[in-house]
Image (spheres, rainbow, N blue to C red):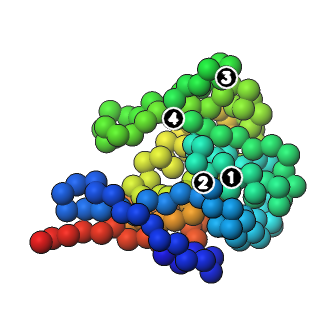
Amino acid sequence: MRICGLSRQLPLSYISKKTQLANFSVLGDVELVDCLADNLAAKLKRLEFDYLVALEVKIVPLVHGIAKRLGHQKFVVCRKSVKPYMAAPIVLKPLAHFPKHVKPLVIDGKDAQLIKGKKVVVIDTVVSTGVTMRMMKKLLEKVGATPVKLIAVLRQGEQFDHFENLLWLAEIPIFKNDS
């Protein structure tokens, strides 16, 4: 895969007998994180917003890099389960019709207060079905924050919901073996 002028080999994992997905992670890849942070910070430079909100931990190095480049002193990380350090966590459970693998989204109560009434940019590594982004928008509404831009480093497939303010940097295919 090529992204922001860099090439990376992505391992494939089977999600069914005939379908494989490429696994993407920025964890431990300093060159890729710096390149992506430079690219996304440049795209966000003129956008008016108060905080970056990360979806889970594996995107944290990138969000940190973007925040640093934009002069932000703090960003927020949402998790998929309540953690012991959280004070008064706010949980959004998946709707009953969502796939079984979909986890809740959780924001620490103090972070919820921090972004209440603020404009935020949401960042995730991959958007595939759009379920997590949709849930994130609901969680932000619940805490009183306004998402002004949704960012995914990669878009995978075309089965996801349309998001009016979604930005992605590259696409990765879904690999189907019909034999």
Who comes first in sequence, dot 2 or dot 3?
2
Q: Which residue is drawn at the image coordinates 83% and 61% (left, top)?
A: 69
Vertical side of 175 occupied by 139: above or below: above
Mark 1 in CB contact with mark 4 (< 8 angstroms): no
Who comes first in sequence, dot 3 or dot 4?
4
Mark 3 in CB contact with mark 4 (< 8 angstroms): no
Mark 1 to mark 2: distance in Å?
A: 7 Å
| Residue hosting label 1 | 61
Label placed on residue 80 = 4
Q: The C terminus appears in which quarter of the rendering?
A: bottom left
Kindly indicate the quadrant of the structure image that contains residue 88: top right
Amino acid at circle 4: Lys
Vertical side of 118 occupied by 2: above or below: below
Q: Position of residue 28 (x, y in %)?
A: 62, 56
Q: Is residue 81 visible?
A: yes
Label placed on residue 85 = 3
Q: Which residue is drawn at the image coordinates 25% and 62% (left, top)?
A: 19
Depth check, mark 3 against mark 4: the one in front is 3
Who comes first in sequence, dot 2 or dot 4?
2
Amino acid at circle 3: Tyr
| Residue hosting label 2 | 27
Residue 136 or residue 31, whichever sits in front: 31
Categorize mark 3 by other alpha carbons within 10 Å: few (<14), some (14-19), many (20+): few
